[in-house]
Image (tube, grey):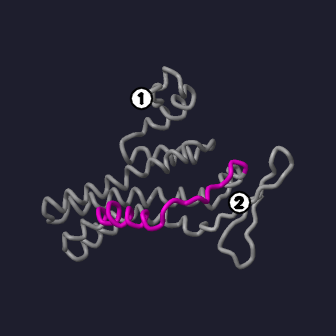
Amino acid sequence: KKRQPTGCVCMIFVATTDDGGEIRYVDRKRWLWIISVLTPSVPAIGALALWATGNPVWALLPVLVYYVATPLIDMVVGSDPNNPPEAVVGALSEDQYYRALLFLSVPVFWASFLVPAIVASTQPVPVWAWLLLAVGAGASSGTGLTVAHELGHKPNRLDQWGAKIMCALSGYAHFCLEHNRGHHVQVATPEDRASGRLGE
């Protein structure tokens, strides 16, 4: 079960353990998860700014955010020891807020692929800016596989279609079949090409 305390921007998930005890997990960063939807928009924002201003320097935005600012923020913030216990993972996965974030990110990822492509093909930009637009769109699209992976593990058809749409973005639509019907069925066996061999 879950509840949201009055005056708190968090959610408390409660689960019962096998021995009848109670585990409470407080997601204090619940509303910060919206950043996961906004972060993939960086290539689209950079491309739109380039289009609006005509300044090709805006093509640098995704590279600066993804490869400079994000690692620096990661160094400053450090590791997050606040992981949910296994007992509440089921309740977390049933929470529609997190599912909505996954689906909200799908058009954002596609916009960050299409907008730079349109700007690169319709605006007079130097080759270096064209390459940076491609790198930014590719970096964003590649991370979309994490969304596809999450949606692909859900049992309903809408989530499965969302996974396929996200996998298509990076040209890896067969991931849904290979991962769920190959890797998860054959994990850690010689037939599983996704599992490393002993010592690899």
* Percent coordinates x, y for residue 55 in the rendering: 19, 74
Q: Which residue is mark 2?
A: 25
* Percent coordinates x, y for residue 64 in the rendering: 30, 66
In the displayed structure, would residue 150 be above or below residue 3? above
Q: Amino acid at mark 2?
A: Tyr
Quadrant of the snapshot with the N terminus = bottom right
Q: Main secondary structure of the magenta part?
A: helix
Q: Which mark is residue 29?
A: none
SS class, disc 2: strand
The residue positioned 27% from the left and 57% from the top of the image is 117
The residue positioned 67% from the left and 50% from the top of the image is 89
Q: Which residue is mark 1?
A: 200
The residue positioned 41% from the left and 57% from the top of the image is 109
Q: Amino acid at mark 1?
A: Glu
Is the residue marked by circle 1 packed among few (<14), some (14-19), or many (20+) residues within 10 Å? few
- As drawn, is 75 to the left or to the right of 62? right
